[in-house]
């Protein structure tokens, strides 16, 4: 099945809650004081988590989070630094988070038309 286009009203969206953000913010690398100012890290991480949950191509990351290229490069940096598995574990500890769902079970993303993507535990290669 083809991924939903970014503009599709059925495309799942979510913003990291303040509780989820507090659980992972300390794990993230600080932006470099040099170069262009970094985008809003919470929005970028929401895009990274959205892509992880949906397994959609990076180009399908909703623009409301950050440009897909920013999310992709940030995820690559998290993988390179070895902190991505820690971020996934930290989000799993937040009750009701994207990764635990409301019943404490692994979450899944509803892609519409009865198509669901189950959360994969662990890391994956970025596309």
Image: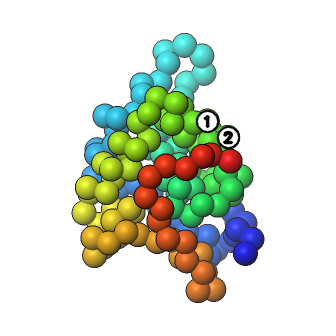
Q: Are marks 2 and 1 in contact (CB under 8 Å)?
A: yes
Give the vertical position of 60 relative to 34 (above or below): below
Residue occupying the point 55% across, 77% down: 116
**Residue 52: percent from left, percent from top:** 53, 55
| Image quadrant where one finds the N terminus | bottom right
As rendered, which of 12 and 110 lies closer to the eye? 110
Identified at 70% across, 70% down, the residue is 4
Q: Find the distance from the CA under tag 2 to the CA under tag 1.
A: 6 Å
Color encoding of the figure: rainbow
Vertical side of 108 occupied by 66: above or below: above
**Label 1 belongs to which residue?**
73
Give the secondary structure at mark 1: helix
Residue drawn 30% across the image and 48% down it: 90
Residue 48 in picture, x, y percent from top left: 53, 49
Give the x, y percent position of residue 33. Answer: 49, 15
Residue pointed to by mark 2: 69
Q: Is residue 79 left or right of residue 68?
A: left
Residue 67 can be seen in this image: no
Position of residue 103 in the picture relative to residue 37 (left or right): left
Residue 10 in picture, x, y percent from top left: 62, 76
- Is residue 97 visible in the rendered image? The answer is yes
Which of the 4 image quarters holds residue 27? Answer: top left
Front-most of 59 and 100?
A: 100
Instruction: Please give left or right for residue 123 compared with residue 20 in the image.
Output: right
Q: Residue at x 64, y 61 (%)?
A: 56
């Amino acid at each position: 099945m083809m991924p939903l286009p970014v503009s599709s009203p059925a495309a799942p969206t979510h913003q990291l809650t303040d509780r989820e953000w507090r659980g992972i913010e300390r794990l993230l690398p600080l932006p470099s004081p040099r170069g262009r100012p970094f985008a809003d890290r919470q929005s970028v991480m929401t895009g990274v988590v959205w892509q992880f949950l949906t397994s959609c191509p990076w180009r399908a990351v909703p623009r409301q989070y950050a440009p897909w290229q920013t999310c992709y490069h940030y995820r690559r940096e998290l993988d390179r630094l070895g902190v991505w598995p820690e971020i996934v574990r930290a989000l799993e500890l937040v009750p009701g988070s994207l990764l635990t769902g409301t019943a404490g079970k692994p979450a899944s993303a509803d892609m519409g038309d009865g198509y669901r993507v189950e959360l994969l535990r662990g890391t994956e290669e970025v596309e």
